[in-house]
Image (cartoon, grey):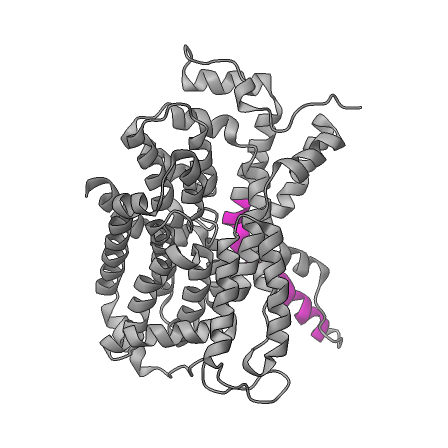
């Protein structure tokens, strides 16, 4: 029987390190709790796996094509090969952290026993955010909601004559700001769906595809900071630090809007010729026009009372976002409502929201074991280094985890509180794992990126709007 240990070891149980350097403190913690190194090592391997996902996908395609060519040469019917499917599965970014969680839990069982490992994943970890994202993504991607959002943004885009460039700018500016009221996950879902219809379907260049994705991720990350209840990194600190919407508007809101407008305008100037040229390509039919579903009959335009009901279900989910029983119950009622109004509904899409929820669940399993080193790092930094450190840590951790750990630092001064949250939201677009809504955007837009989104190209594309946001938040 393995010796029983607490997983994770309570942070307050580590001895005081007032007279130690940061390196000395981390070494002492690792010696006191060797499982720390194993958990962080597995987490880093999972992060590296996400950066390598495109390679697995590319290899899967090559293996599949070779197997199909061999089958045709032998006069056989081409069938999906086992190894091609395995490689394709390993290339799905949404499953990466879940796969490595199996390795993590195997090590936890060997180190602390089955009961402790089970206690950690079942009783210590909170999956509320992952569950909420599944529900809000599903609601936000329904035909009446997307149609209403498209209609509303069409009025904004009409100020620019409704061109693809006008749609592009309207979605990237207005959509992220809505995240402060309908949650970032819902805003990301709606923005990604509309960008797919009004922009990506017109086949822009690869450079413009990545630039758009980068500015979308950064804008959504900062766009949720006008209120205290919509952005995950803000939610983590709002109650412990007493931040309300008035505080957020005064300290974050106007900076967020400025950053969004400047970043979008910058990329518009860089790509203005290509954005204008997209107007010559085939237009995309509106969501609200009657169309055909899989069973054949034309769908009817959603009447106002159906649209209002959908937004009512979304409001219920947002209002009860901390209470899974409540928002899941509301979601089940919604499924019944959608069935009874099927003449106005397209098929309810659950695969993508479930994969995103699985991604986030795996991420929090790993993230819950990283406090042993993130906490001391944050505690030793001054204001400017803390801002930069929080931005950098966010790139390899969910930004909500970074701000949550900051609430555990005793007697953190108010300027340092602002610095860590600003850094967390500014860096929230650099990688897929940096901000909880990002996997939703990747899942909905990944089909436009030749197999898989390259993490390095995403990082490069998001770097400019990240730097703009950093300058706005720290210098204005």
In this view, which residue lies farthest toward the bottom? 297
In this view, which residue lies farthest toward the right? 1
Image-quadrant location for residue 73: bottom right
In this view, which residue lies farthest toward the top? 19
Residue at (25%, 58%) from the top-left corner?
A: 261
Residue at (68%, 37%) from the top-left corner?
A: 105
Residue 412 locus on image (x, y percent): 36, 26
**Dominant secondary structure, magenta:** helix
Residue 107 locus on image (x, y percent): 68, 32
Span shown in magenta: 48-72
Residue at (54%, 85%) from the top-left corner?
A: 299
Query: Closer to the camera, 18 or 96?
Result: 18
Residue 267 locus on image (x, y percent): 26, 61
Residue at (24%, 51%) from the top-left corner?
A: 254
In this rendering, the answer to whether 90 lies above or below 298 is above
In this rendering, the answer to whether 82 lies above or below 36 is below
How many numbered circles does the render carry?
A: 0
In this rendering, the answer to whether 3 lies above or below 453 is above
Residue 91 locus on image (x, y percent): 58, 55
Q: Is residue 266 visible?
A: yes
Residue 65 in the magenta stretch? The answer is yes
Q: Looking at the rendering, in which quadrant would you find the N terminus? A: top right
Q: Looking at the rendering, in which quadrant would you find the C terminus? A: top left
Query: Closer to the camera, 344 or 442?
Result: 344
Q: Is residue 91 visible?
A: no
In this rendering, the answer to whether 155 lies above or below 10 is below
Residue 449 in the magenta stretch? The answer is no
Task: Give the side of residue 102 with respect to residue 390, left or right.
Answer: right
């Amino acid at each position: 029987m393995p010796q029983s240990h607490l997983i994770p070891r309570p942070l307050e149980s580590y001895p005081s390190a007032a007279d130690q350097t940061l390196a000395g403190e981390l070494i002492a913690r690792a010696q006191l709790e060797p499982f720390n190194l194993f958990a962080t090592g597995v987490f880093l391997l999972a992060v590296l796996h996400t950066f390598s996902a495109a390679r697995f996908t590319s290899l899967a395609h090559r293996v599949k094509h070779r197997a199909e060519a061999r089958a045709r040469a032998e006069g056989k019917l081409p069938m999906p090969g086992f190894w091609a499917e395995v490689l394709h599965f390993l290339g799905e970014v949404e499953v990466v952290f879940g796969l490595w969680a199996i390795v993590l839990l195997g090590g936890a069982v060997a180190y602390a026993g089955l009961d402790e490992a089970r206690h950690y994943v079942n009783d210590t970890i909170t999956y509320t955010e992952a569950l909420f994202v599944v529900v809000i993504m599903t609601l936000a991607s329904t035909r009446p909601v997307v149609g209403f959002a498209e209609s509303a943004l069409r009025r904004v885009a009409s100020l620019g004559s409704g061109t693809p460039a006008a749609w592009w700018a309207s979605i990237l500016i207005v959509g992220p700001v809505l995240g402060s009221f309908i949650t970032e996950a819902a805003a990301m879902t709606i923005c990604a769906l509309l960008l797919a219809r009004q922009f990506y379907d017109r086949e822009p260049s690869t450079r413009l595809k990545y630039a758009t994705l980068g500015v979308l991720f950064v804008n959504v990350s900062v766009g949720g900071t006008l209120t205290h209840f919509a952005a995950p990194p803000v939610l983590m600190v709002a109650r412990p630090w007493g931040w309300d919407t008035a505080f957020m508007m005064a300290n974050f809101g106007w900076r967020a809007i400025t950053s969004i407008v400047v970043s979008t305008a910058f990329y518009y100037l860089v790509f203005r010729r290509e954005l204008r040229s997209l107007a010559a390509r085939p237009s995309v039919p509106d969501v609200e026009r009657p169309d055909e579903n899989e069973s054949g009959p034309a769908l009817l335009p959603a009447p106002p009372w159906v649209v209002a009901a959908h937004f009512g279900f979304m409001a219920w989910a947002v209002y009860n976002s901390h209470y899974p029983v409540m928002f899941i119950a509301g979601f089940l009622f919604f499924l019944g409502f959608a069935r009874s109004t099927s003449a106005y509904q397209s098929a309810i899409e659950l695969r993508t929201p479930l994969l995103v929820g699985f991604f986030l669940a795996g991420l929090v399993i790993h993230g819950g074991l990283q406090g042993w080193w993130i906490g001391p790092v944050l505690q030793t930094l001054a204001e400017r280094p803390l801002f930069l450190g929080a931005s950098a840590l966010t790139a390899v951790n969910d930004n909500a985890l970074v701000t949550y750990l900051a609430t555990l630092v005793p007697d953190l001064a108010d300027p340092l509180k602002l610095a860590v949250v600003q850094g967390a939201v500014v860096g929230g677009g650099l990688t897929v794992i940096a901000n909880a809504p990002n996997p939703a955007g990747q899942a909905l837009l990944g089909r436009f990126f030749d197999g898989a989104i390259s993490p390095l190209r995403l990082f490069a594309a998001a770097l400019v709007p990240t730097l703009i946001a950093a300058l706005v938040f720290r210098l204005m």
